[in-house]
Amino acid sequence: MTIWNKIRTGQWISRTYLLMLVFNLLYNSLIYYSGQWMGTHTKARNIEISLDNQIPVIPWFVGIYFSFFLFCAVNFLMMGYYGKKKACLFLCAELLAKTVCGIFYLCFPTTNLRPEIVGTDFWSRMLVELYQMDAAVNLFPSIHCMDSWFCVVVLRNIRKVPGWYMTITWIWAAAICASTLFTKQHGILDVAAGIALAELSYICVIRWKKTERFRLWMEKKRI
């Protein structure tokens, strides 16, 4: 049976879960662009600490920064394949965390001081492109770090996930968090807040009994 047939019949990853991921992507875009608009039309605060100034710019980390999209795409699918009940909790926690991010982006916009990139090598040019594409807003908490850490939080609670894959997930997530610092896309407080928000959101949905209704509904849809 082909992968498409397995998806179509819900034997691999259910269509309901995939549709919820699409909804999550749209919601993420709403949060991101609303925060971009607020951050560029109001006075944003710089909450960098002194330790941020000691972190050097390492242009090649932009490659790891962009790997975030592949990392999340693969792991979000892994959640739906290995731990279907945990995937339901992840969707609830993700929406909760994104809502918290949106509140901060709209009510407490932050920014940072980006360095001038003078190098002409490939990675330096890529970093300049990143700065041009992504304004220095939507920083606290860091969605890059939050979603990367969500992969760690959820997968470490799924027994079926192979140990070697979990090790790769830990290392890759940590590298992505580090990349936000070495590219000066985020500061230390942004990274810490993103990781903490992933942990706390997941704990909240586990303890919130109403998420059980959502899980049961997803099970009826053959998640």
Image (spheres, rainbow, N blue to C red):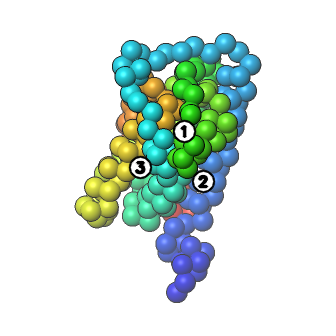
Foreground: 63 or 26? 63
Q: Position of residue 154 (x, y in %)?
A: 38, 49
Q: Label 3 crowding class (10 Å Cα cut-off): few <14, some 14-19, many 20+?
A: many
Q: Quadrant of residue 125?
A: top right
Q: Residue at x 41, y 16 (%)?
A: 49
The label number, if any, that marks residue 64 in the structure image? none
- Disc 1 to disc 3: CB gap under 8 Å: no
- In the image as oriented, which residue stretches furthest toward the left? 163
In the rendered view, tell whether residue 108 sits above or below residue 67. above
Judging from the image, what secondary structure is the residue with disc 2 in? Answer: helix
Q: Which residue is mark 2?
A: 20
Position of 39 relative to 144 (above/below): above
Q: Residue tagged by mark 1?
A: 119
Residue occupying image coordinates x 60% and y 65%: 15
Say how many tags the image has. 3
Q: Nearer the viewer, mark 1 or mark 3?
A: 1
User: Farthest bottom residue?
Assistant: 1
Residue 151 tag number: 3
Q: Give the SS element for disc 3.
A: helix
Note whether residue 61 is visible.
yes
Q: Are marks 2 and 3 in contact (CB under 8 Å)?
A: no
Q: Amino acid at mark 3?
A: Cys
Three-letter residue code for mark 2: Met
Separation of residues labelled 2 and 3 (CA atoms): 16 Å
